[in-house]
Image: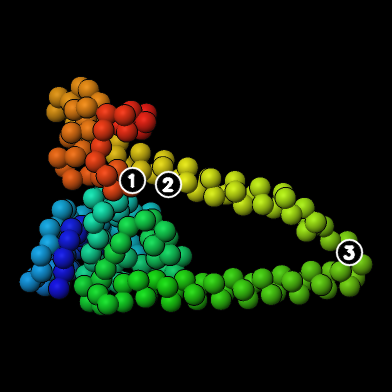
Amino acid sequence: MATGSFVSYLRVSTAKQGQSGLGLEAQRKAVADYLNGGSWTLLAEYVEVESGANDERPKLAEALARCRLHNATLVIAKLDRLSRDVHFLTGLQKAGAKFVAADMPEANEMVVQIMAAVAQAERRMISARTKAALQAAKARGVRLGGDRGNLPGVGDKGRAISAAERHRKAEQRTKDLAPTIAELRAQGATSLRQIAEGLNERGITTARGGRWSAVQVQRLGL
């Protein structure tokens, strides 16, 4: 039984399908059937007309941003409405938003993990081939470089990567919030306190799940 807040994402592959509604209504019904009977709120519906081979999908990006802002779950009718591409689904998982497929609700996280495991296996195979090539080069007398003795440098690099990831997430959060803050200002919010109140009224929490204050809005730099 579905509970919580949801954002619906529907996709068709051709403009003709998008204009006629063919495919969209079936997807919409699948989503409605999945949600039916639970205690849920459908915050928004996003419709994309795009080829499955193209991972650049602005409506999906908007839907994911909405999910992140409201801690909602992205709900789709079928897994193949997103993509059959392993890296794309893994990227979806990294986007920081939950998602579920109406046709296989129990497999939402499991499927991504399995697909990610397949991708990891592929990377190991590539790594093995690379090591074999390096060993062959060494056997031919080619001098191989490396930085195995620089452990402090490796640690510094790891910390830098971690800091960069935190910075990336903070920038993404600010980017997600920008349209809503612009809308609040257009509606007459002129102070940081009024913007904070507007975000709280819309049910948008801070990154840590708390309520907004004027100081926190100021830190966004928007």
- Residue nearest the observer in this picture, 79 or 200: 200
- Residue type at the position of mark 2: Lys
Give the spatial CA distance, label 2 vs label 1.
10 Å
User: For mark 2, does the 10 Å Cα neighbourhood hold few (<14), some (14 to 19), or many (20 or more) residues?
Assistant: some
Residue 142 is labelled as 3
Find residue 140 and report its horizontal and vertical position in percent. Answer: 90, 70
Query: Disc 2 vs disc 1: Cβ atoms closer than 8 Å?
Result: yes
**Residue 49 at what x, y percent from top left?**
26, 57
- On screen, 6 above or below 160? below
Amino acid bearing label 3? Val
Image quadrant of residue 1? bottom left
Image mark for residue 207: 1
Q: Is mark 3 in CB contact (under 8 Å) with mark 2?
A: no
Q: Amino acid at mark 1?
A: Ala
Q: Is residue 194 above or below residue 174?
A: above
Q: Looking at this view, is 144 or 160 the one in front? A: 160
- Comparing 1 with 51, the one in front is 1
* Residue at the image point whose x is 65% and y is 49% from the top: 157
* Residue found at the far right of this picture: 141
Please name the residue that numbered disc 2 is placed on: 169
Q: CA distance from mark 3 to mark 2?
A: 42 Å
Residue 35 in the figure: left or right of residue 163: left
Colouring style: rainbow
Closer to the N terminus: mark 2 or mark 1? 2
Measured as percent of width and height from the top left, residue 202 is found at 16, 42
Q: Residue at x 70, y 74 (%)?
A: 129
Decide if residue 181 is in sight here: no
